[in-house]
Amino acid sequence: MDTPAVPMPKDARERVILDNLTGIRDHLLLLKRDRTNYIRSQDVVLLYDQIIDQVKQLNEIRKGEEKGENRLDKVLESCFQLLSLFFMTIGRTTEAPAAYALTSTIKRLLDHLTESGLFSAKDLDSMSHTLSTLDGVIDNTNSQHSPYLVELLANREHICKAALVRLREQLNKLEEPLRAVHEMLISILRSMSLANTKAKFSTSEVQKLQTQLKEIDATRVDGKFVDANGTVLEGSDTVADLLRRCLLWSDIVLDRKGVVPENFKAKYDVLVSIRNDLEKLSITQAWSLRETDLYDYQRELDKIDESRIDGNFLDEDGNPAELYVQRTLLYLIRRSYGYIYYLMISSEPVSEALLPYYNQLQTLKRCLVEVKNSGGVSSVRDLYPYSMKLNSIDNLRVDGKFMVGDDIPEGQGSVNELLAECFELAYELRVSADENANDSD
């Protein structure tokens, strides 16, 4: 979107649409940066309708013709990406627009897994489950949203599923006993890469991981992985090659001790900063995340990832990165995309206006469940703090709804359901306490 390499539309009518979409995108960006007010559903839906209107006009102009990608397509992609994150922010996570950003991230992750060949069954299982969930989202919102958007999402999902099948086929070539070994090697490799990018490098940490690799290596017979009968297991060469790569990487990491050459230091520092920010968000996301914030991280990652030439990074003088630098930078990019994926699938179906109440109720529910599982309370008096908090939240409702001014934010059902669960738990604990008191008497 920011590079002259993407040409302007030649058609004057497309240039008009480009100007309109640029204005909508700028409006979305301004809305994203406004921290003084919560994001309202009606504002997002209005901008969504404006984007869809531009898409209809674009389809009329192109009428199915393939003219190649230009600046208009890039701006439209940015609009949909932002819009998708806005739908997550207002709590409409089960509608088609919210799925757009998620499919973008999944595709990016799958491309990296395909490129590196370093992945585990857990990686594929998670994304497969998410795509299955998106099937239902797309099917259930067919009539509510633009056919163009639904078709676009279906195509993107199809591409992701095809990539998953290809990756799954690679793992299926490994005989059952080797799959656990393969999983462990991937875990060790990632742990070494994490240790390599910490603020303070720990030699002992990497040496322990290297020892684990050598223990796995010692289980081989004549360089092969075999079963109890001495028969070479199917996929032995594949896992042996992965082991070799892990041992090589451990030697390189111990030699370099986390020191990145000066000509790639700036890029490394940016990626470490993004990774660290996203890591913090993954811990505190329930209280501090506004999903639209992910747009800036995604955009920065995409620009760095797409700046590679033939898969490698170049410095300012056009010199390619050595193996150590390339693997270190790619690890940071992939780890950051992984955090973005986790934050997206963790998004609650509640507007940011109601999140404070929702989060408080979740904490209350966890406390009440813990009290119940540990034997309950000795007297009703012990429940007073919980009851007071529940009643204070309940009293915020107007005619059964949580209002912000004259607005009724999204997610009323989720918050009310959670509130009812907390009241039910508190009631059960009160009844149990009364029964215990009667038994004592």
Image: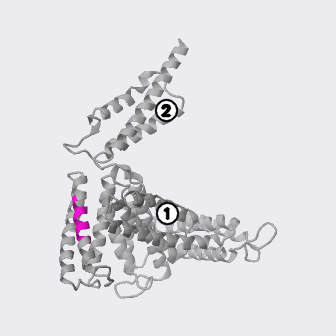
Q: Position of residue 185 (x, y in %)?
A: 61, 68
193 relative to 79 in the view: left or right: right
Task: Tell me what residue is drawn at x 24 percent, y 41 percent.
Answer: 403
| Residue identifier under label 1 | 127
Give SS at disc 2: helix
Task: Tell me what residue is drawn at x 19 percent, y 43 percent.
Answer: 406
Question: Where does the N terminus fall, quadrant-wise?
Answer: bottom left
43 relative to 290 in the view: left or right: left
* Relative to 253, residue 280 above or below: above
67 relative to 234 in the view: left or right: left
Three-letter residue code for mark 1:
Met
Q: Which residues are magenta?
A: 46-55
| Residue identifier under label 2 | 371
Looking at this view, name the residue that lies furthest to the bottom. Answer: 318
Give SS at disc 1: helix
Magenta-drawn stretch contains 226: no
Q: Quadrant of residue 414?
A: top left
Q: Position of residue 233 (x, y in %)?
A: 73, 72
Task: Tell me what residue is drawn at x 58 percent, y 70 percent.
Answer: 168
